[in-house]
Amino acid sequence: MKIGPKYKIARRLKSPVFEKTQTQKFVLSESKKSRPVRRRKNITDYGRQLLEKQKARYSYLLTEKQFSRYIFEAMARKDKKNADALFENLESRLDNVVLRLGLAPTRPSARQMVSHGHIFVNSRKMTIPSYRVSINDVISVKERSLSKGVTIGLEERLKEVTVPVWISLDAAKKEGVIKKKPVLEGVDLLFDIQSVLEFYSR
């Protein structure tokens, strides 16, 4: 997925939706701006919802087609709240799980690791970043890939990573296990998930 200038997009969305904008350098670059800001008109509900939708889409690096598919699937479910279902859809992607486990430093690199065959699910190579993980799935790094450049810094990264409550991590084995479905409760998101759903409900 081609993104464009990430700093510019993050400034427009007023949210650090990319890893490179979640740094002190980005914060400092924002604070150094001294030019007066032209007062904007009050944003409409539609404008606010569109902004939150864009934040969510860029946070997970999804195309409009991919993102809307997750939305409508979540809205069609009857077994749980739409917000919970959408969060589950997004977080259950294999590339997202690789990122959450700390097996990759960024979302693009997590996607690349999966696409290039460096990630196993239940001891089988999986090359589809959008693959949806299930409870008890074991996610690991291909043994031969551990000696390649793609895993540079992995040891240190696994010492510092904090995994979500729905995943368990065995840093020594460099693998994680899906303990339960992703849960939205208690999670701080960079976007308002309810506004995102409202945008597609119009």
Image (spheres, rainbow, N blue to C red):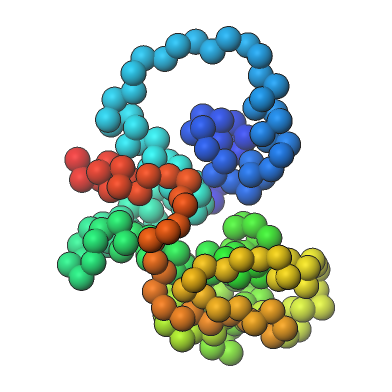
Residue at 56% x, 30% y is 11
Q: Can you name the residue that lies furthest to the front here?
A: 186
The quadrant in which residue 134 appears is bottom left
Q: Is residue 14 above or below residue 34?
A: below
Left or right, residue 156 beside residue 39: right
Q: Could one spot residue 113 in this view of the protein?
A: no
Left or right, residue 81 beside residue 29: left
Q: Can you name the residue that lies furthest to the bottom here?
A: 123
Query: x and y percent of residue 31 in the render?
Result: 66, 25
Q: Tally the numbered discs.
A: 0
Viewer-nearest residue: 120 or 18 = 18
Q: Quadrant of the C terminus?
A: top left
The quadrant in which residue 46 appears is top left
Query: x and y percent of residue 195 in the render?
Result: 31, 42
Query: x and y percent of residue 75 in the render?
Result: 23, 58
Left or right, residue 12 beside residue 85: right
Residue at 47% x, 52% y is 188
Residue at 71% x, 39% y is 24
The quadrant in which residue 114 appears is bottom right
